[in-house]
Amino acid sequence: MVYTTTLRRSAFMQKVWNQKFLIVMSVPFIIHIIIFRYLPIFGWIMAFQNYKPHKAIFDQEWVGFEQFKLLFQDSYFFQTLRNTLAMAVIKLVMGTVFALFIAILINETKKGLFKRTVQTVSYLPNFISWVVAANLVLEFLSPSGIFNQFLVTIGVIKSPVLWMGKPELFWWIIGWSHVWKTAGFGAIIYLAAMTGIDPQLYEAADMDGAGRLRRIWHITLPGIKPTVIVLLIMNIGHLLEAGFEQQYLLNNGLVQDYAEVFTIYILRYGIQMMRFSYAAAAGIFRSVVSVTLIFIANRISNKLGEESLM
């Protein structure tokens, strides 16, 4: 028994030594996770207090679940939750569909130079900050912008429209601007997955007379399905994180009831009003719901016999 334990320990140490460079490279990432992801969880105790900044953390007044009661009694909280979920679902669906679409188009392109050019152009917007991107969107959709001028020229509308002043369109503006900025970069992951598909499958399909659409439907999409499902599960966990900069910069008084998302709600009605306990309670709610959504999506994927995270 002692001999077996010694052999296992020796094999483990040998494996550690063989992967020493990978372990060293992982240390900064582990430190980052501990400092910025796990240590802040200590601040959750504020959600059960009536926190006052001038007092020590353990000298605060403990109020139990009072902050959560206030959170669920606020009608504006549920309006914000509606906006967050609506924009998150729109961004998730449109982002996934268009990233797949771009990846398939690039993968089917045979001209090397054209293929690289399209790929580069499609993912460049991802490197533009939302401060710049939001201003581009506002200029594009302004009454004197190119979008209005184009629609007036072709006769779709008679006069310019204030698109950013229409609350019912704001969610879709968020969705389309998200697609423009991120779909090209998201396509890189799917392109990487496509490189793992056996080329002999395409050759066999050609010999059987399958056209391009048939090859995409029966080979390409099934080949990258595990990647798509894993990314969907991970993104579902971020449904309550529909964004901050995008909505904050594109928001205005005319669309505010449709533009407020969870992160902005926490900032405005928690931190800016010095209601730190209220902000902590809202943050706990978001984290618990996000983790629950991941487990539910993962469970459903397991039940359907598909890929999962665990």
Image (spheres, rainbow, N blue to C red):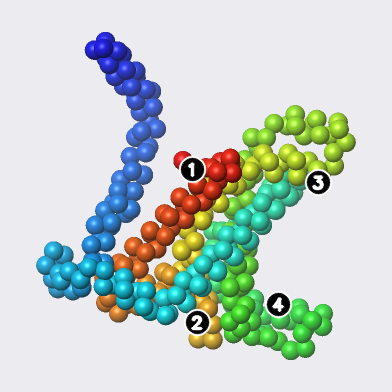
**Is the residue under label 1 in contact with that under label 4 (CB below 8 Å)?**
no
For marks 2 and 1 on the same chain, the one whose residue lies earlier in the sequence: 2
Residue receiving disc 3 = 213
Q: Nearer the viewer, residue 292 or 215?
A: 292
Given the image, on which type of amino acid does mark 2 rest? Gln
Measured along the vertical axis of the image, is residue 118 above or below residue 8?
below
In the image: residue 267, left or right of residue 165: left
Please state which amino acid type lies under the numbered disc 3.
Leu
**Horizontal side, residue 180 vs residue 278: left or right:** right
Q: CA distance from mark 3 to mark 2?
A: 43 Å
Q: Quadrant of the N terminus?
A: top left
Q: Is residue 189 visible?
A: no
Q: Position of residue 284 (x, y in %)?
A: 34, 62
Q: CA distance from mark 1 to mark 3?
A: 30 Å
User: Which sits earlier in the primary sequence, circle 2 or circle 4?
Assistant: 4
Q: Is residue 69 visible?
A: yes
Q: Residues within 10 Å of mark 1 (few under 14, many from 20)?
A: some
Q: Residue at x 17, y 69 (%)?
A: 62
Q: CA distance from mark 2 to mark 1?
A: 37 Å
The span from disc 4 to disc 1 (Cα, nearest Å) is 42 Å
Question: For this rendering, which residue is in front, 150 or 280?
Answer: 280
Secondary-structure class at tag 3: helix
163 with respect to 277 (left or right): right
Q: Nearer the viewer, mark 2 or mark 1?
A: 1
Residue position marked by numbered label 4 in the rendering? 147
Graded by Cα atoms within 10 Å as few (under 14), some (14 to 19) or many (20 or more), the crowding at tag 4 reads some
Q: Which residue is mark 2?
A: 256
The CA span between labels 2 and 4 is 23 Å
